[in-house]
Image: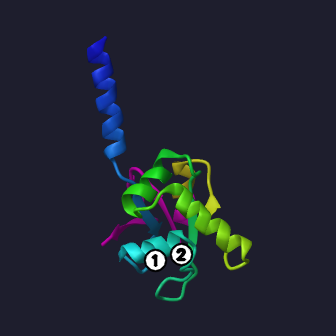
Amino acid sequence: MILFWMLLTQLALADLAMAAEIIANSSVGVNSLSLASARSIFGMRQVKWPDDKHIQVFVLADTHPTHIALCKERLNLFPYQLRQSWDRLVYAGMAQAPIEVANEEELVNKVATTPGAIGYVRKVKTNDAIKIIAIQ
């Protein structure tokens, strides 16, 4: 029984160790972002790519493990901090909230079919319509 719980714990930790990958539509002309730019984009403060295309942000629910991984491991924020930023900008009429989708599969489909889109997933599958964006 102890061995079972040890194995279960190791599997859970291995799953948590897999960080979220930032993905974008293949039309996006950017291959990497600074941490500040990634925070600005996901915080809804940067709304255009360098080539002046509109950025469409897709996210998962605040409590989704992949969303938590993105916030903590890639953006160095807590999910509630990102939510507060969205709520503040929406309330002030300065931005629209990102589009929330139900699961990672839907998020990949939305990013793949929306020019200028950005999002995130735990594991990227081979798909020509999206690309991985590195954070420097």
Q: Secondary structure at mark 2?
A: loop
Q: In the image, what residue occupies the spot 48% across and 45% down?
A: 65
Q: Which residues are magenta?
A: 109-136
Q: CA distance from mark 1 to mark 2?
A: 6 Å
What amino acid does circle 2 point to? Gly
Q: Which residue is mark 2?
A: 116
Residue annotated with mark 1: 28
Q: Which residue is at a point 53% across and 49% down the rendered structure image?
A: 105
Image coordinates for residue 114, horizontal then vertical, percent: 58, 69
Q: Is residue 7 visible?
A: yes
Amino acid type, mark 1: Val
Q: Quadrant of the N terminus?
A: top left
In magenta stretch: residue 132? yes
Up-down: is 1 above or below 107? above
Question: Quarter of the image containing the C terminus?
Answer: bottom left
Query: Residue 29 at x, y = what percent?
Result: 42, 80
The percent position of residue 24, horizontal first and vertical second, equals 46, 68
Compared across the picture, whether 53 is left or right of 17 comes to right
Q: Is residue 115 magenta?
A: yes
The number of numbered discs placed on residues in the rendered structure image is: 2
Which residue is drawn at the image coordinates 68% and 79% (left, top)? 94
Q: Which numbered disc flags the more N-terminal residue, 1 or 2?
A: 1
